[in-house]
Every structure is written in C-alpha cells, then in structure tokens.
Image (tube, rainbow, N blue to C red):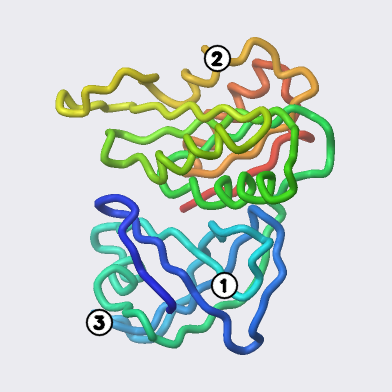
Amino acid sequence: VASIRDLTHDVKEVRLSLLDPPYMSFKAGQFIQFLVPACDGMKEPVYRAYSIASSPAITNQIEIHVKYVPGGVSTTCIHKHLREGDAVIIVGPDGDLHLRDTDRQIVLIAGGSGMAPIRSMLLEMACTHSRRKAIFFFGVKARRDLVLFDEMRQLEKQLADFRFIPALSNAEPADNWQGETGLITEVFSRNIDSGADTEAYLCGSPPMINACLKALKAKGIPDSQTYYDRFV
C-alpha cells in the first residue's frame, strides 16, 4: 500500500505499488480482486472486486476507490485498519468493461464509486490524445459525494471534446448547487437528443444500471453498444 487518501467523506483512494510481479498491464475499465485481510471478527480473508481507477499507461502502480459501507466487513477493514506500507494480495486484471476502438460518440454514466473505471478510461483518452466526443453523466446524492470534481473539470480542458455533467439527486441547502439535479437517468435523457452512432459505458448499482439501459434504448443506443459493470 503506497498511499491512502480521502476523496470524499466516505470514499478512499488506495494506491498500490506492485511487487511480485512488479507490473500489471490492464485495459482502462477493468477490475482486480483485492484480498481483504481478516479483521473485526472476520473468520478468514475475503476477495472483493474493485475497479481500477488509474491510467493503464502506469503499469507499476494501480489505484482503487473504496466506498465505506456501514457494517460491511471488507470496506470496514480497508477504511479502518489498512495502513500505508501494508502488503496485500490482488488478482487480475479481469472484466470486459473497456473502451472499444471505434469512432463512435461515447456516453459514460456512473454513480458514486462507479467513478473509478470511468476515470481510468478518461485518463487513457488523455494519454492517447483522443479526439472522440465523450459525455460523462455522474450522479451522487449531495455535493459532498462528488468524487474528483476538480479533476473532471481539468479533463474537460485537456481532452479535445469532453463534457462532464454531474448531478445531485438529494441536494442539501448548504450545497448551493446550481447544476443538474434529479436521477442520473433523467439528466441523461434531458441532455441527449439522439443516441445514433453512440456507445455507452456504465458503472453503478444494479438498479441504476437497469434504469440506464431503459434510458439508453429510448435514445436509440442498442445493447450491443452498451458495456457495464454492476456493483453489488
């Protein structure tokens, strides 16, 4: 564990330096299995899947985002007990969520810690100087849940044709939020007229994914051009 930092009040970024082997090649959007050590009453270590949040151009380190789930044994161990310098075991990479090599417009939709694989894709696009049009719809409850907001705004300046659209579903008065509000599927539907010649990449909870699939179909984006991971 090279470093641990707070991204929000309940999401930590864990950066891992690879030792044996000292590198790992992966596609932006893929995930690893993290062996969470036994702690807080756990009888044995347990594997949990986490999407890789870092750029595939960096092969000697990877980053993951871990959202704290009250009562969750694995997230409690990572948030409360994992320390810089600890040795951990990961297995991977795995998963079929990765950017396809086409010229289609890209729609990205994520909620909460589903930011991780989307961020990896955007960093890959920045590294390769991609000029593809991409729109990222990111839904959270309140302002304090917005992960890497400033970094996404910086990527808007860095990428040739990228737009970041965050939305709050339960904004608090103190947020003083002037942006989009409502469910992320509603925000997507308001901002996309047609899904012609478009492919979509999704990451979030099963209910969010299911709602997104219906919204995408309504805009003409077929299942064959839609790729996703479900977080459970």
Secondary element under disc 3, as helix, strand or loop, is loop
Q: Which residue is mark 1?
A: 61
- Mark pair 2, 1: CA separation: 36 Å
Q: Position of residue 137 (x, y in %)?
A: 51, 30
Residue at left 26%, top 40%?
Answer: 144
Q: Position of residue 177 (x, y in %)?
A: 27, 22
Vertical order, 67 against 147 (above or below): below
Query: In the image, what residue occupies the spot 55% across and 16% down?
Result: 189
Tell me which label, 2 or 3, sits earlier in the chain: 3
Q: Which of 140/159 is in front?
A: 159
Which element carries disc 1, helix, strand or loop?
Answer: strand
Q: What amino acid does circle 1 point to? A: Gln
What whole-number distance in Å separates the C-alpha atoms at marks 3 and 1?
30 Å
Badge 3 crowding class, 10 Å Cα cut-off, few under 14, some 14 to 19, many 20 or more, is: few
Amino acid type, residue under disc 3 in the picture: Gly
User: Looking at the picture, how far across and down is residue 132, in whole percent?
Assistant: 74, 32
**Disc 2 marks which amino acid?**
Asn
Numbered disc in front, either 3 or 1: 1
Quadrant in the picture for the N terminus = bottom left
**Among the two numbered marks 2 and 1 on one chain, the one whose residue lies closer to the N terminus:** 1
* 19 sits left or right of 80 in the view: right
Q: Which residue is mark 3?
A: 41
Q: Residue at x 50, y 64 (%)?
A: 63
Are dots 3 and 1 in contact, CB under 8 Å? no
Residue under label 2: 191
